[in-house]
Amino acid sequence: MRRFAASLFLAAAVALPASAVETFNTSAGPVKITIIQHASLMIEAGGKIIYLDPSQGSYEGLPAADLILITDIHGDHMDPKSIAKVSKTGTEILAPSAVAATVTAAKVISNGETQKWEQWTIEAVPMYNLTRGPAPGKLFHDKGRGNGYLLTYGGKRFYFSGDTENIPEMRALKNIDVAFVCMNLPYTMPPDEAAQGVRAMHPKVVYPYHYRGSELSIFQKGLEGSGVDVRLRDWYAKS
């Protein structure tokens, strides 16, 4: 992927640096989410550590994973070296079957399946392209190959879109407290399309992520008046 060039809008916006920690209170205690880079982040709750798509950015000084969730086979989501970096004895990995074919330690979770892990409920939800692909008749992300994830902890619901377009399954999600939604062309969707999907889903809080090269002011403008709290963070500070 091409390197990110910050827009004038982002330069003027108040953006936290990479490795910033976002904290959310739940009935089971706080959930802390650490921004790493692009689509990679760390979740901490109840003394347990979860990584989502450990691939890009630095993991120096970060704790080892109790659980790793992987969304798809592409290198900006699945990187064996990064997985090894954050793993320890006993680390569990959940991923779709296409990932498990390469990451042999992974246990398969497929679209529509739900698993309990510690105090978390983990639901694999669809992520795919509707129209965009590398050539006519081909898609960057085929339906059923990858997973978005809906995680519930202490009564709060956290959605991580993975690589997707504005699909019906995303628009139909309900009662989402915090959403992390992708946007970048040509691989997923543009900011205005992402905003349309978020309006339909209507989470309380949304973070654009996996947005390399996208104009976030368009996404923010598309959600004006919606009541959704749009939080911009710099996921590429160290790129």
Image (spheres, rainbow, N blue to C red):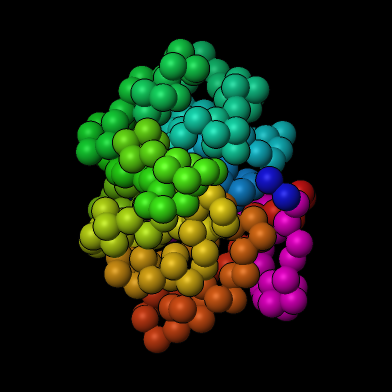
- Which of the two residues, 76 or 158, is positioned nearer the viewer here? 76
Picture residue at 23% right of the left edge, 60% below the top: 172
Residue 99 appears in view: yes
Q: Is residue 25 magenta?
A: yes
- Which of the two residues, 149 or 116, is positioned nearer the viewer here? 149
**Residue 207: x, y in percent?**
50, 62
Q: Is residue 57 magenta?
A: no
**Residue 16: x, y in percent?**
66, 63
Label count reads: 0
Picture residue at 41% right of the left edge, 49% below the top: 129
Picture residue at 36% right of the left edge, 23% below the top: 97
Picture residue at 38% right of the left edge, 71% below the top: 196
Residue 180 appears in view: no
Q: Quadrant of residue 117?
A: top left
Give above or below for 39 relative to 231: above
Q: Quadrant of residue 166?
A: bottom left
In the image, is 6 to the left or to the right of 221? Answer: right
* Residue ranking furthest to the bottom: 225
Q: Quadrant of residue 74?
A: top right
Secondary structure mostly seen in the magenta stretch: loop
**Residue 98: x, y in percent?**
41, 24
Q: Which residues are magenta?
A: 3-27
- Which of the two residues, 66 or 233, is positioned nearer the viewer here? 233
- Which of the two residues, 9 or 91, is positioned nearer the viewer here? 9
**Residue 119: x, y in percent?**
29, 37
Give above or below for 184 relative to 126: below
